[in-house]
Amino acid sequence: MQSLPSPRGLHSPTIRILHLTVASWPFEAWGMDIIGPIPPPSSQGHRFILAIADYFSKWAEAVPLAEVKTSNVISFLKRHVIYHFGLPRRIMHDNGPQFASHVFYRFCDKHHIQNVASTPYNPAANGLAEAFNKTASNSARSLFSNKHDWNEKLGECLWAYRTTVRTATGNTPFSLVYGSEAVLPLETQIPSLRVALTYQLTTDDNYRRRLQELEALMKSAS
């Protein structure tokens, strides 16, 4: 990892350049990217989607935005990453202006977060967020019956992504984060064996089963 010198002088932000992406534990490293502008805008004026994905579990978060400013990025990170999953060790991005600003640099420095940019020589460094973006875009084509309400359908895209097995881990992001698979709507209408067995267990037995499942999931993902 090396530093990218700024032509504007010593007081300009220095952004780390990523050569190798490694996450040793959940929520250590995130890849962030921007989708858009999306035509047409939503009925509420949203034109972009700001997305971020965890490199370890592949868990993703995303929000619709009317415009992508550094203040929006920082607010998104606080609300959807830090307050839910704790401070990350590093954040990867494509070195867009929102991530290269003095304000974002100071935010990362204050919280001891490595501000890491991919380069033209290593565009795959931020490939995780871009992969989520592709999934969201593909889901949009089938889910968005009314093009102007795509912002309201974003939650469905996230749900589909989080509950689908990812090739890299062989597990769903949901299971790696919560230790068990999500109960899908069909399982409540036609109770599955998994749900039926869970309801029959005592609280202590259920805790033990969950711990065993979590240990197995973490081993398979590592």
Image (tube, helix red, strand yellow):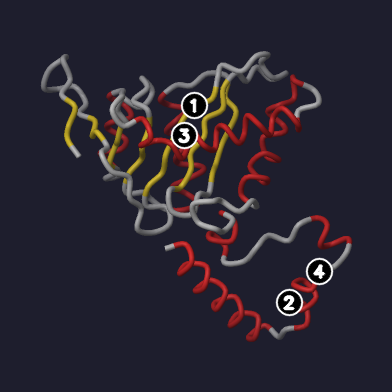
Q: Which residue is mark 1?
A: 34
73 vs 23, left or right, is right
Q: Residue at x 47, y 62 (%)?
A: 221
99 vs 34, left or right, is left
Instruction: Measure the alpha-carbon separation of dots 3 and 2.
Output: 38 Å
Question: Farthest residue in the right direction?
Answer: 189
Label 3's element?
helix
| Residue placed under numbered mark 3 in the picture | 75
- Measure how far apart labels 1 and 2 are at the Cα level: 40 Å
Label 2 and label 4: CA atoms lie apart by 10 Å
The quarter of the rendered structure image containing the C terminus is: bottom left
Which residue position is annotated with label 2?
198
Which of discs 1 and 4 lies nearer the camera? The answer is 4
Residue under label 4: 192
Where does residue 106 sit, x and y in percent of width and height?
27, 32
What is the spatial separation of the Cα atoms under label 1 and label 4, in whole angstroms?
38 Å
Q: CA distance from mark 3 to mark 1?
A: 15 Å
Specify the amino acid type for callout 4.
Ser
SS of the residue under disc 2: helix
